[in-house]
């Protein structure tokens, strides 16, 4: 951590609590919390650090916690869905799940004494909830019909999972990225209709061809907040699919090491871009990446209106169809 960052840490209570104890540390203390009960827990651990493992204290429902998962691209197997259903079923009317705007699920009614068993259940079906709250990278979004859409240009499911694995150390937690200045959103699309709303993400990859090769133009800095709303802007960079994970890492490392921390209302990535200037920010990312990025393709492939996917549509797999349903 730089000297400048250390100075800013002293001015911000959230930076202080992160400096005192990494949020991921509570992962090793779950058994202890389960035994003592939520009321006996350290208040900062209960109300803040638990968020690093996806567990949220809700003052309006004391003793009944919310658990936010990580579902990259919103994809689940039937086995995973059944496991989640079993978790909330035990709580009767208190147990239910929210579908979030980032293709994710949040489980409600969770009791602290059940966390060890619940985490074991999640691990058994390759699910995790690490790094889903506070100053972490949130669920990575992608096309809702990735791998199925007959018109998609690139199936992004594998690269989305690779980003998730890099961020979370394959789901167990990664201290490299648990102390960002603020939350961070990533989206990637291989489709033509911007289903991921690329413009509202801190970092987004949209399909583009450069000299006949498929890749992605890069957008940076999008976010909505009470203080400011900005659409992501072009980084003037094009990258091939195999560089997506490395570029994510480089941008996050720059944000982690140089991001603004004094005022949490001015800590998202766009504020850093404003301070450095876009060209300088791009140069710093290239330095972190260890190689130059190509200039962005003059034209991207986002040329369709957004689709709602409700109904029955032919898949890219011959003879098969996918069904889109509305969840009210």
Image (spheres, grey):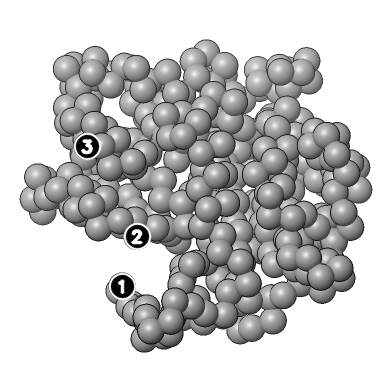
Residue mark closest to the camera, 3 vs 2: 3
Q: Are dots 3 and 2 in contact, CB under 8 Å?
A: no
- Looking at marks 2 and 1 on the same chain, the residue that comes earlier in the sequence is marked by 2
Q: Along the horizontal axis of the image, is 294 left or right of 179?
A: right
Q: Which residue is mark 3?
A: 121
| Residue 132 image-quadrant placement | top left
* Disc 2/disc 1 C-alpha distance (Å): 9 Å
Residue 64, percent from left and from top: 21, 39
Q: Residue at x 53, y 53 (%)?
A: 158
* Disc 1/disc 3 C-alpha distance (Å): 26 Å
* Disc 3/disc 2 C-alpha distance (Å): 20 Å
Q: Along the horizontal axis of the image, is 125 left or right of 94?
A: right
Mark number for residue 99?
2
Residue placed most toward the observer, 314 or 293: 314
Q: Residue at x 83, y 34 (%)?
A: 290
Residue placed most toward the observer, 151 or 67: 151
Q: Residue at x 68, y 59 (%)?
A: 205
Q: Which residue is mark 1?
A: 327
- Looking at marks 3 and 2 on the same chain, the residue that comes earlier in the sequence is marked by 2
Q: Is residue 193 above or below residue 276?
A: below
Callout 3: few (<14), some (14-19), or many (20+) C-alpha neighbours within 10 Å?
some
Q: Are dots 2 and 1 in contact, CB under 8 Å?
A: yes
Q: Secondary structure at mark 2?
A: strand
């Amino acid at each position: 951590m730089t000297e400048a960052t250390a100075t800013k840490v002293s001015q911000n209570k959230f930076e202080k609590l992160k400096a005192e104890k990494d949020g991921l540390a509570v992962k090793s203390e779950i058994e202890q919390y389960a035994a003592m009960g939520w009321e006996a827990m350290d208040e900062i651990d209960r109300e803040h650090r638990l968020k690093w493992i996806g567990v949220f204290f809700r003052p309006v429902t004391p003793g009944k916690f919310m658990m936010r998962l990580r579902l990259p691209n919103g994809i689940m197997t039937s086995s995973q869905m059944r496991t989640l259903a079993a978790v909330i079923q035990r709580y009767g009317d208190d147990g239910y799940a929210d579908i979030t705007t980032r293709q994710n699920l949040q489980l409600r009614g969770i009791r602290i004494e059940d966390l060890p068993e619940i985490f074991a259940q999640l691990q058994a079906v390759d699910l995790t909830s690490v790094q889903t709250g506070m100053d972490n990278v949130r669920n990575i979004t992608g096309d809702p019909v990735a791998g199925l859409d007959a018109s998609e240009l690139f199936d992004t499911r594998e690269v989305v999972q690779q980003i998730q694995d890099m961020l979370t150390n394959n789901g167990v937690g990664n201290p490299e990225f648990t102390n960002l200045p603020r939350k961070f959103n990533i989206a990637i699309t291989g489709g033509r209709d911007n289903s991921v709303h690329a413009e509202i993400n801190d970092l987004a990859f949209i399909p583009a061809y450069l000299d006949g090769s498929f890749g992605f133009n890069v957008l940076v800095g999008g976010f909505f907040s009470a203080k400011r709303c900005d659409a992501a802007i072009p980084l003037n960079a094009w990258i091939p699919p195999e560089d997506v994970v490395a570029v994510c890492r480089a941008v996050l490392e720059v944000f982690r090491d140089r991001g603004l921390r004094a005022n949490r209302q001015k800590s998202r990535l766009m504020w850093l871009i404003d301070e450095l200037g876009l060209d300088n920010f791009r140069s710093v990312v290239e330095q972190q990446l260890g190689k130059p990025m190509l200039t962005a393709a003059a034209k991207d492939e986002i040329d369709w209106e957004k689709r709602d996917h409700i109904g029955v549509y032919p898949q890219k797999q011959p003879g098969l169809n996918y069904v889109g349903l509305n969840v009210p």
